[in-house]
């Protein structure tokens, strides 16, 4: 097999650029292009890259009949991999319930999921998938100590569609319930939130230095009705931070709804005030053991080379 295979990566910029860099380091001729959506001219500009690629790698997809992915698989005979990661599976499930799912996408693409529960959700639509974790950049070095002052980090996306799976009401009620706790909400800027914001809630918008923010965080609160494997959850766990999330995960406090989440926060605050709140060692071990980045990169590279072999 030639040492430099061509892979065209389409989809979400955060994941796509990360995969482009990883695969180039592994000897691939990797090119990432943000997904053009339903822009016909955008797809026409992509045709030369699609034709040259040994593999088209879609990070997130649609499944409805007549969507661009459906047309791509209508004309392309070489491999197409779809890596599902969360909300895209919800959209696909809606199309399946309406009887509008493309059998061509279901049967001709290779389907990977970044979380095991997404495999089951695809299976309910008649789509056979495998759990293939994405190589999350967890912190493998020494975990920084928890901050001396209790600080909570909240996540709420900016886009109204993405917000639909987040418990925005609970997230925005928490600062008022805990006036002596500092809260930071990202990536939604203050002007995108119903105001006025309480004085203990900061909403700086997009943050580039997440490591610095994690160092000033005691607990990450992520409240969703549907999710994939959360990079933020694992990044926080790898730094020994505590995490409240709606999905059951080793080292995570599983909670949903205002009362349960408030109770979980009160317990953590009480432990800190009593001098008994240390690093989340269980969560850190889980993140480092299950999401060892070098191992996941090796596995992803092996799988992709097997697809094009």
Image: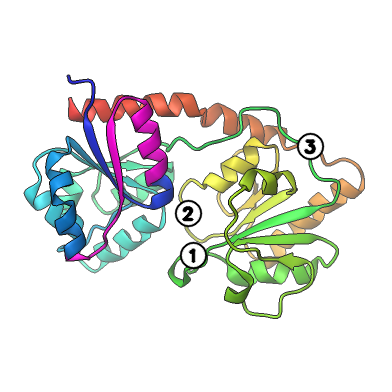
Q: Is residue 138 magenta?
A: no
**Residue to which mark 1 is pinned:** 165
Q: Measured from the top left, where is residue 50 in percent x and y? A: 16, 45
Q: Are marks 2 and 1 in contact (CB under 8 Å)?
A: yes
Give the SS element for disc 2: loop
Circle 2: is it few (<14), some (14-19), or many (20+) Cα within 10 Å?
many
Mark nearest the camera among 2 and 3 is: 3
Q: Which residues are the magenta region?
A: 16-40
Q: Which numbered dot is residue 180? A: none
**Residue to which mark 2 is pinned:** 227
Measure the alpha-carbon separation of dots 2 and 3: 29 Å
Mark nearest the camera among 1 and 3 is: 3
Tell me which residue sits at (25%, 26%) in the image.
305
Q: Are marks 1 and 3 in contact (CB under 8 Å)?
A: no
Tell me which residue sits at (47%, 54%) in the image.
227
Q: Are marks 2 and 3 in contact (CB under 8 Å)?
A: no
Q: Measured from the top left, where is residue 20 in percent x and y? A: 35, 38
């Amino acid at each position: 097999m030639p040492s430099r295979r061509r892979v065209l990566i389409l989809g979400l910029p955060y994941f796509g650029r990360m995969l482009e860099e990883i695969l180039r380091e592994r000897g691939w001729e990797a090119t990432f292009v943000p997904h053009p959506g339903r822009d016909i001219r955008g797809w026409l500009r992509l045709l030369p890259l699609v034709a040259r690629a040994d593999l088209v790698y879609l990070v997130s997809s649609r499944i409805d009949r007549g969507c661009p992915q459906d047309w791509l698989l209508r004309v392309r005979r070489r491999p197409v991999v779809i890596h599902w990661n969360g909300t895209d599976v919800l959209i696909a499930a809606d199309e399946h319930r309406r009887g509008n799912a493309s059998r061509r996408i279901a049967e001709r693409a290779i389907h990977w999921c970044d979380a095991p529960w997404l495999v089951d959700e695809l299976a309910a639509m008649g789509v056979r998938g495998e759990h293939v974790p994405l190589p999350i950049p967890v912190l493998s070095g020494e975990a920084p100590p928890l901050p001396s002052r209790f600080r909570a980090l909240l996540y709420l996306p900016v886009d109204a569609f993405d917000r639909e799976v987040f418990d925005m009401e609970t997230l925005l009620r928490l600062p008022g319930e805990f006036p002596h706790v500092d809260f930071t909400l990202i990536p939604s800027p203050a002007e995108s939130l119903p105001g006025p914001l309480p004085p203990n809630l900061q909403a700086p918008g997009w943050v580039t230095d997440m490591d610095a923010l994690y160092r000033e965080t005691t607990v990450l609160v992520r409240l969703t009705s549907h999710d994939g494997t959360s990079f933020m959850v694992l990044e926080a766990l790898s730094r020994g931070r505590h995490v409240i999330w709606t999905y059951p995960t080793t080292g995570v406090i599983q909670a949903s709804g205002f009362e349960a989440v408030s109770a979980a926060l009160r317990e953590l605050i009480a432990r800190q005030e009593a001098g008994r709140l240390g690093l989340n060692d269980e969560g850190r071990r889980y993140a480092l053991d299950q999401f060892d980045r070098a191992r996941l990169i090796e596995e992803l590279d092996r799988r992709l080379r097997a697809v094009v072999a």
